[in-house]
Image (spheres, rainbow, N blue to C red):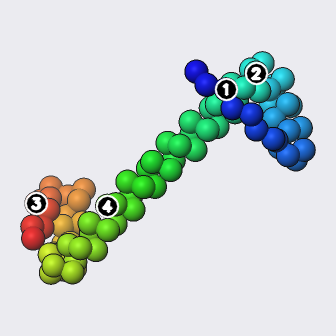
Amino acid sequence: MSITSIRIADDVDKPLEALSKKLDRSRNYIINQAIKEFLARQSLEDSRWQDTLEALESIKAGKTIDEEDVNAWLNSWGTNDRNSPPKL
């Protein structure tokens, strides 16, 4: 485990201290959890961005599905005659 020094602004420090006492956890634990959650969220955003770029490339290549086919499929959900998903 590495050690990193950070400066915490007063408007963050006071609520951090209060949360630390409320949860009976160290400030270090809360900061580490916050960083882990931030990194996980950033990773998810990166993944979604990559998916978006791939989708745009697919559209540029003409790989699309007609709106009517998609709507017919979605409208069949919850019925006894559920359609198969439309194919490219």
Q: CA distance from mark 3 to mark 1?
A: 54 Å
Return the x and y of residue 46 as percentages of the image width and height: 42, 55
Vertical placement of residue 66 versus 17, above or below? below
Q: Amino acid at mark 3?
A: Ser
Q: Closer to us: mark 2 or mark 3?
A: 2
Q: CA distance from mark 2 to mark 3?
A: 53 Å
Q: Amino acid at mark 4?
A: Asp
Q: Quadrant of residue 25?
A: top right
| Between discs 3 and 4, the one toward the N terminus | 4
Q: Are marks 2 and 4 in contact (CB under 8 Å)?
A: no
Q: Are marks 4 and 1 in contact (CB under 8 Å)?
A: no
Residue of label 3: 84
- The answer to whether residue 75 is seen in the rendering is no
| Between discs 2 and 4, the one toward the N terminus | 2
Q: Quadrant of the C terminus?
A: bottom left
- The answer to whether residue 39 is seen in the rendering is yes
Q: CA distance from mark 1 to mark 2?
A: 15 Å
Q: Judge from the rendering whether residue 87 lies leftward or rightward of residue 43; answer left or right.
A: left
Residue of label 4: 51
Q: Judge from the rendering whether residue 34 lies leftward or rightward of residue 71; answer left or right.
A: right
Q: Judge from the rendering whether residue 7 lies leftward or rightward of residue 49; answer left or right.
A: right
Q: Are marks 3 and 4 in contact (CB under 8 Å)?
A: no
Residue of label 1: 3
Q: CA distance from mark 4 to mark 1?
A: 35 Å
Q: Residue at x 50, y 50 (%)?
A: 42
Q: Secondary structure at mark 2?
A: loop
**Mark 1, other Cα within 10 Å: few <14 / some 14–19 / many ≥20:** few
Vertical placement of residue 35 versus 69, above or below? above
Marker disc for residue 26: 2
